[in-house]
Image (cartoon, rainbow, N blue to C red):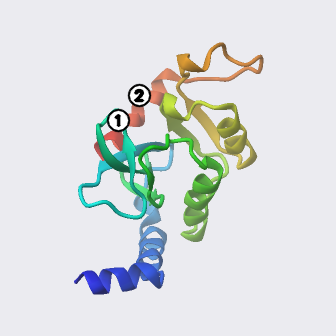
Amino acid sequence: MYYHFQKWAADGSLRRVWVELLRCKRKLLNLCSVQLDGSQTICKRGGEWVGFQTRKAANTCNSLFLSDDTGMLLACSGPVAGNHHDLFEIEKVFKQLTELLREAGLEVDGLFLNADAGFDSEAFRKLCSSLRIEANIAFNPRNGTASEDYVYFDQELYKRRNGVEQA
């Protein structure tokens, strides 16, 4: 079983199946907003993408997940060592996630994106803006004072993030 799984992952078969599923079932997706979140997974046996996460006191890896408004997973990033935060190489990772959506025929222009305070950075907001995505990102008080630019935050829209947390 593991031989076949590794073979399908390496030759892109799993990705092609996922893209085709999204393409065929896109009418069932609720894209009034999309939710972005990261997830740390404890890795007991090590691996290529493992790093020590002090907060969890264990070796972990981190992946980013994008879901629709109901919590249906749309895309998942590859693993990143757990000693990195959610914004590590965010431009590369987020472009991969949005490219997968485009491959499946899902338009990203005009999407409303909810993300927690871990994604609060001026660079990520600019990236979303360049992709024509409306970012609704919670403010991170550890970032200090807000920039002089006006940044809109909709608390009611943000409450919909629960779907990705449950996914």
Query: Does residue 70 appear anywhere in the picture?
Result: no
Occupied quadrant, residue 88: top right
Q: Position of residue 122 (x, y in %)?
A: 69, 31
Judge left or right: residue 22 versus residue 100: left
User: Where 164 falls versus 26 (above or below)?
Assistant: above
- Give neighbour class at mark 1: few <14, some 14-19, many 20+ (Cα, 10 Å): few
Q: Position of residue 7 (x, y in %)?
A: 38, 86
Q: In 3D space, how far apart are the residues under numbered discs 1 and 2 (Cα atoms)?
A: 7 Å
For image coordinates 52% across by 25% down, the residue present is 138
59 or 97, nearer to the observer: 59
Q: Crowding at label 2, few (<14), some or many (≥20) Cα neighbours within 10 Å?
A: few
> Relative to 20, is 132 above or below?
above
Q: Is residue 57 above or below residue 49?
A: above
Q: At 46% from the left edge and 59% from the top edge, which residue is drawn?
A: 75
Q: Check disc 2 and report the residue beneath it.
A: 159
| Residue denoted by label 1 | 162
Q: Quadrant of residue 9?
A: bottom left
- Name the residue nearer the viewer: 25 or 79: 79
Looking at the picture, does residue 16 appear above or below residue 148? Answer: below
Q: Position of residue 94 (x, y in %)?
A: 59, 52
Q: What amino acid does circle 1 point to?
A: Asn
Q: Which residue does the image show at 41% across and 64% down from the upper left?
A: 48
